[in-house]
Amino acid sequence: MRRSAFTLVEVLVTGALLLLVLAIMLAILVPALRAWLRSDERSQVQQSALLVLLKVREEVRDAAPGSLKPLANGLALASFGSKPEYAEGDLLWRKHVVVYLAEREVRSQDLPFPPNIAAPPFTTFTPRADDHLVTRNIRTLSCELTARKTVHVRVEAELRGRVAVLESILAPVMR
């Protein structure tokens, strides 16, 4: 009766070939995985900057004429929101909106007006714990009022050394 079995040499050769195949696969897959991670980080940082720009654009679009006030770390304005209301032919402003940067997070604060009043001038604001988080990983947010009553917005986002910079000029929509 003859038993069939693998010899020690056959097992060692098979193990060596398996290790060689694994090493080749790792040499191919590791750079591809690193490239994918870099691309994903780049996409995340661009998306963070775009979210801030879209939030500021949305609020500037609904801003009361003359209410735009650039801050050192953001923008304040009076807004009538997405559904304007009128009283005796005058547009009623619903809220003050502040979009600001604090500790690498962009937050939004809505301060409602008392009913049936014109937009009062903006004075100051105090960040609150319940302010709406827009996004994280923002390095700078600057808003400058231009001579044409538009706002020049610059957003810099950073994540693990990857930086995205977006700039735009925004104007309120007169309704």
Image (cartoon, grey):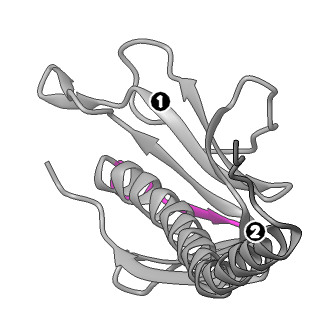
Q: What is the quadrant of the N terminus in the image? A: top right
**Prevailing secondary structure class for the magenta stretch in the rendered image:** loop
Task: Residue 59: give x, y in percent of width and height.
Answer: 40, 49
Residue 95: mark: 1
Give the vertical position of 161 relative to 127 (above or below).
below
What is the x, y in percent for residue 168?
40, 80
Query: Pointer 1 and pointer 2: residues touching (CB < 8 Å)?
Result: no
Residue 25 falls in which quadrant of the image? Answer: bottom right
Q: Nearer the viewer, residue 161 or 15?
A: 15
Horizontal arrangement in the rendering, residue 61 relative to residue 46 (left or right)? left
Q: Nearer the viewer, residue 96 or 3?
A: 3
Residue at x 79%, y 67% (from the top left corner)? 11
Percent from the top left, x then y, of residue 145?
50, 77
Q: How many marks?
A: 2
Residue 87 in view here: yes
Magenta region: which residues?
63-71
Residue 149 rendering spot, x and y as whole percentages: 37, 75
Residue 142 magenta-drawn? no
| SS of the residue under disc 1 | strand
Residue that sits furthest to the top in the current view = 115
Depth check: give the residue in front, 116 or 75. Answer: 75
- Name which of mark 1 and mark 2 comes first in the sequence: 2
Residue at 74% over, 54% down:
5
Residue in view at x 80 percent, y 29 percent: 128
Q: Residues within 10 Å of mark 2 (few under 14, many from 20)?
A: few
Residue at figure coordinates x 45%, y 84% from the top left: 146
Q: Which residue is mark 2?
A: 72
Question: Is 175 drawn above or below residue 50 in the view shown?
Answer: above
Label 1 – label 2 distance at C-alpha: 21 Å
